[in-house]
Amino acid sequence: MCELRELDDAGDGIDGAESATYPLTATTLPGGDGVAANRRLIHDMLIRNFIFWLSSKRGVTNAIARRGMKYGFARRFVAGETLAEALAASDELCRAGRHVSLNHLGENVSTEAAAREVCAGYLEMTEQMHAKNLAGNISIKLTQLGLDLGKDLCGALTLSIAKRAAELGRTIEMDMEGSVYTDATLDIFESVQRETGNCGLAIQAYLHRTEKDIQRLAPLRPKIRLVKGAYREPANIAVQGKPAVDANYRKLTTMLLEGATRGLYFPAIASHDPFMVAHAQSEAARLGLPKDKYELQMIYGIRRDLQQQARDAGNILQVYVPFGTDWCPYFMRRLSERPANCWFVLRSLVAESSS
Ligand SMILES: Cc1cc2nc3c(=O)[nH]c(=O)nc-3n(C[C@H](O)[C@H](O)[C@H](O)COP(=O)(O)OP(=O)(O)OC[C@H]3O[C@@H](n4cnc5c(N)ncnc54)[C@H](O)[C@@H]3O)c2cc1C
């Protein structure tokens, strides 16, 4: 951990050494003049593609997987490989006034036995969080609960988790995955939420359909986690490019916050983008929405400076805490989101190999 702090102080950018200089107003544009901003976008895109390419090379991912936890650099974004480690990290966050959402890393399963095993793991996470009195919930992925094998199986397993959480007076959240799963995820969410009333759902601002989906969900009074969207989707399904996604994100943020003033949603604004966070805060203030009627969400280890600012501003902050042995693809995604994160890993590796 000491080493991480040292790198933070050196300004690796992970905690926003560069963007922390932006004033937190929704109207300020990053990147200086247009040419410089374009150059930066192209540069970031090339690095992103390079990391995607690297993440398909078994040799590279195996090397990272072997060293990541041992040398500690993966711990910046992953709370550990075991539930016990994730609970310890969550306990620390809760003591610092955050809520947590525990996420067991992994995606599609191909057998019913594997889906049931994942389900048992989610139930155990809920029981343990409850026993330790941790504020927050668990986030589940429906493809881990057998969505590829059928909606009935997946729906039944999801319902069993939501029911147990409800018995304990707790909630669950559902991640949103690639667009081939959007319809099925919404259907399962609706039927489970109708029965238990304790579910939240991630909704992706980049999808053309999202505004309608948000309207469709209003009768269920759900918690909606608004994210930009993490998958590669074609232009007929999702808006393309950061400016367009950001514009949609702002619009949907306002829509959710307005809905919250009428008791329709509990909006969870999930972004590390200071402009999106500032937009949510200023819109909530404009609408007179109290700070306990919406929340901000960010991911473990990312933009901890912004996380602290959110707490200092009196916002509820929920931190998404991923853990598990299958952490390497998740870790590579976090690297590709921000080139500065690569420097952080390289410097950790160099420091370790020379010591
Ligand atoms: C709590 C939470 C849950 C999520 N759940 C889902 C889900 O269920 N389904 C889904 O499709 N997506 C999910 N996502 C991911 C989301 O869709 C985006 O891909 C991701 O959050 C990047 O978008 P952004 O708004 O944070 O920032 P971007 O628009 O990518 O970047 C804007 C700024 O944010 C900061 N930033 C962003 N990423 C990083 C990073 N890795 N390291 C350092 N700084 C960074 C930088 O300052 C950057 O300039 C989730 C995100 C969060 C925060």
Image (cartoon, rainbow, N blue to C red):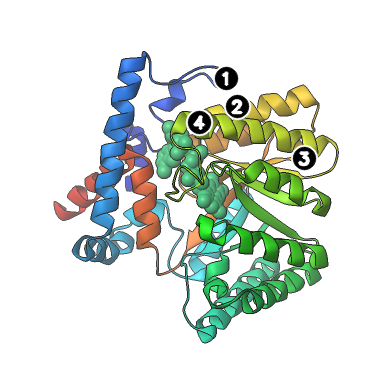
Graded by Cα atoms within 10 Å as few (under 14), some (14 to 19) or many (20 or more), the crowding at tag 3 reads few
The tag on residue 25 is: 1
Tell me if residue 38 comes above or below residue 205 in the rendering: above
Name the kind of residue labelled 4 in the image. Answer: Ala
Q: Disc 2 vs disc 1: Cβ atoms closer than 8 Å?
A: yes
The residue located at (33%, 62%) in the rendering is: 69
Amino acid bearing label 3: Asp
| Quadrant of the image occupied by residue 156 | bottom right
Asked if disc 3 and disc 4 are in contact, CB closer than 8 Å, the reply is no
Is 13 or 182 nearer to us in this picture?
Answer: 182
Helix, strand or loop for disc 3: helix
Give the left or right position of residue 93, taking residue 340 as reference.
right
- Kind of residue indicated by mark 2: Ala
Compared across the picture, whether 138 is left or right of 55 comes to: right
Task: Estimate the spatial distance between the alpha carbons at disc 2 and disc 3, rounded to whole Å.
Answer: 17 Å
Pointer 2 or 3: first along the chain: 2
